[in-house]
């Protein structure tokens, strides 16, 4: 019996069916729908592509209509570029993808309407660029994204009105560039980014409907000495650094209202006590470190959480009550 079990195990391993495995350290290029459809046939059991992945064509590709053949892929260790896929309306097929080691570039996909399919993505190890997608109306599917290890670019997406979906993004280790998005009017979803994670500059230009850039993360960044920021040719209120700084003086004060989560003490060393709108009891607390990694999940007792096990540093706390989800920064001594 033991020999039979060993034999079946060896057969399963040799066929690549039994356990998740990596493949393609040299990367792969998908230029046809057939190549995508046959991925699981040629690489059975592969859930981690070890190299770069390129989908589409720089000169335009009308053949690729869906990415369902990649449904098993959980990690891409290299970069992911989706370029010129004019027949692609959504990104369904990337539903299992949680982590990208290099940059993520989605550009010039003229029929791409939304990012449905990227709902599980939590981390991008390089820059994240969303450019030239003329029909893109929503990036709400990026609701799980917490960290980008380099720059973030949103440019030339004329149908995009809001950045809703990026509310859990707390770490960008590079620049933020929001440029030439003609109808973009709301960047409030970027409010939870830790300002001191932005290592180079902030640039918001040629967004002619964008009047409010005085969100918490940007206001915090503008308080950093020598923080480089450019605001130009947006709607009135976001046309210069001075305009945004003036707006920050009033907007930040106005934001200290019933929608805020408060922590005591902050900085903290061991126990913290939470207060939420309406004094609702906190049902769950999730704590992220300064690079967007989830480090603690807890169910508070009497709205109190023990953070003594955390290392010293800056954290983002997400508090969930029955009717409300709020976030607040915490410093751990």
Image (cartoon, helix red, strand yellow):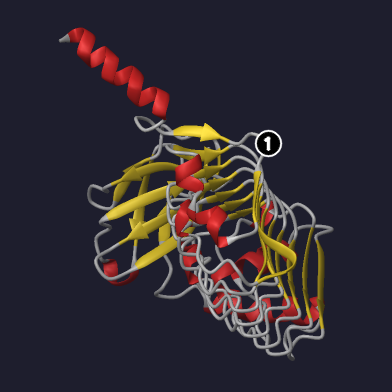
**Residue at image point 60% right, 40% down:** 77
**Residue at image point 65% right, 88% down:** 183
Res. 73 in view: no
Q: Residue furthest left?
A: 1
Tell me residue 95's x, y (percent). Answer: 43, 57
Instruction: Answer with left or right where residue 218 lies relative to residue 58.
Output: left
> Residue 98, relative to residue 276: is it above or below?
above
Q: Nearer the viewer, residue 80 or 220?
A: 80
Q: Label 1: few (<14), some or many (≥20) within 10 Å?
A: few
The quadrant holding residue 8 is: top left
Q: How many marks?
A: 1
The quadrant holding residue 228 is: bottom right
Res. 214 in view: yes
> Residue 228, relative to residue 139: is it above or below?
above
Q: Which residue position holds label 1?
A: 26
> Residue 153, relative to residue 74: is it above or below?
below
**At numbered mark 1, what does the secondary structure look like: helix, strand or loop?**
loop
Q: Nearer the viewer, residue 1 or 332?
A: 1
Q: Nearer the viewer, residue 232 or 245?
A: 232
Tell me residue 22's x, y (percent). Answer: 52, 33
> Residue 82, relative to residue 73: is it above or below?
below
Image quadrant occupied by the N terminus: top left
**Residue at image point 50% right, 71% down:** 90
Tell me residue 284's x, y (percent). Answer: 29, 53
Tell me residue 270's x, y (percent). Answer: 40, 37
């Amino acid at each position: 019996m033991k020999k039979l079990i060993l034999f079946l195990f060896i057969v399963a391993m040799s066929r690549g069916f039994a356990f998740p495995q990596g493949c393609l350290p040299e990367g792969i290029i998908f230029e046809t729908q057939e190549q995508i459809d046959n991925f699981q046939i040629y690489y059975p059991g592969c859930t981690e592509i070890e190299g770069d992945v390129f989908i589409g064509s720089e000169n335009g590709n009308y053949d690729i209509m869906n990415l369902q053949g990649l449904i098993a892929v959980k990690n891409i260790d290299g970069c992911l570029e989706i370029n010129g896929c004019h027949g692609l309306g959504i990104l369904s097929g990337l539903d299992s993808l949680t982590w990208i080691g290099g940059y993520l570039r989605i550009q010039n996909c003229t029929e791409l309407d939304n990012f449905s399919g990227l709902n599980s993505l939590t981390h991008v190890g390089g820059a994240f660029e969303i450019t030239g997608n003329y029909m893109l109306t929503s990036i709400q599917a990026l609701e799980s994204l917490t960290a980008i290890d380099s720059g973030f670019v949103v440019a030339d997406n004329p149908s995009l009105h809001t950045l809703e979906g990026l509310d859990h993004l707390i770490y960008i280790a590079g620049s933020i560039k929001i440029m030439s998005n003609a109808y973009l009017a709301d960047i409030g979803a970027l409010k939870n980014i830790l300002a001191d994670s932005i290592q180079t500059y902030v640039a918001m230009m040629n967004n002619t409907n964008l009047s409010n850039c005085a969100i918490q993360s940007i206001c915090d960044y503008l308080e950093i000495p020598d923080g480089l920021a450019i605001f130009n040719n947006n709607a009135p209120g976001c046309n210069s650094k001075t305009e945004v700084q003036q707006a920050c003086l009033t907007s930040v004060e106005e934001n200290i209202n019933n929608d805020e989560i408060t922590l005591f003490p902050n900085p903290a060393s061991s126990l913290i006590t939470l207060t939420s709108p309406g004094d609702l009891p906190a049902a769950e607390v999730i704590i992220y470190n300064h690079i967007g990694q989830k480090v603690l999940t807890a169910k508070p007792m009497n709205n109190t959480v023990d953070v003594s096990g955390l290392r010293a540093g800056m954290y983002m706390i997400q508090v969930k009550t029955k009717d409300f989800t709020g976030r607040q920064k915490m410093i751990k001594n």
